[in-house]
Image: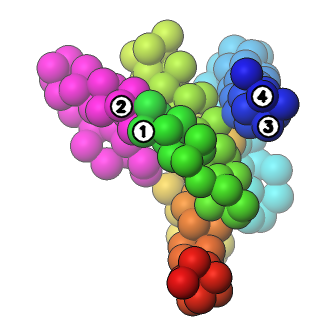
Amino acid sequence: MSKKNILNFFLIIFIFAIDRVTKIYILGLDELISGNTIIVNKFLNLDLIWNRGIAFGIFSFEDNFFYNTITFAILLIILILVYLIYTNNGLTKYSYIVICGGAAGNLFDRIVYSSVPDFIDLNYNGFHWFIFNVADIFITLGVICLILDEILFKKYRYENNN
């Protein structure tokens, strides 16, 4: 295994670890406060919910077959991401690494808890965004970087490859 591949692996593990630490902390905090919402400031609350769906609670069903199918699909997506990490470079590669680390964190929760703990509640004037977790932040940042990479650098890559 090359030094680059080892670094890629450790970046994924580092992102996974950040996600795990925050979730372990919030689960312990939730036990102490008996499920009450913590108001951090007027824009941020910590409020633990359990998400059985995918992003933002989409496809949340109590059906175990459907839940297991989504979990298996996420595992396949992570395997595809690993392949894409090894076949790309630059911003694209690191975007996939960030997405993979976040996805691995949420996959771990789906397997261990049969649900993903979400706890970051952003709000403004009574409007609450979907509650999410640190893994979701990494996944979102990775996707944003992929989009920016495609918009800003596609022409540059095309010109250099021809």
Outermost residue, top side = 112
Viewer-nearest of discs 3 and 2? 3
**Residue 32 within the magenta-colored segment of the rendering:** no
| Above or below 87: residue 77 | above
Marks 4 & 2, CB-CB < 8 Å contact = no
Q: Nearer the viewer, residue 116 or 31?
A: 116
Magenta span of residues: 51-77
Q: Which residue is mark 4?
A: 2
Residue 1 in sight here: yes
CA neighbours of label 3 inside 10 A, class few (<14), some (14 to 19), many (20+)? few
Q: Which residue is mark 1?
A: 80
| Above or below 24: residue 142 | below
Q: Nearer the viewer, residue 81 or 40?
A: 81
Tag 4: residue type?
Ser
Q: Which residue is mark 2?
A: 76
| SS for callout 2 | helix
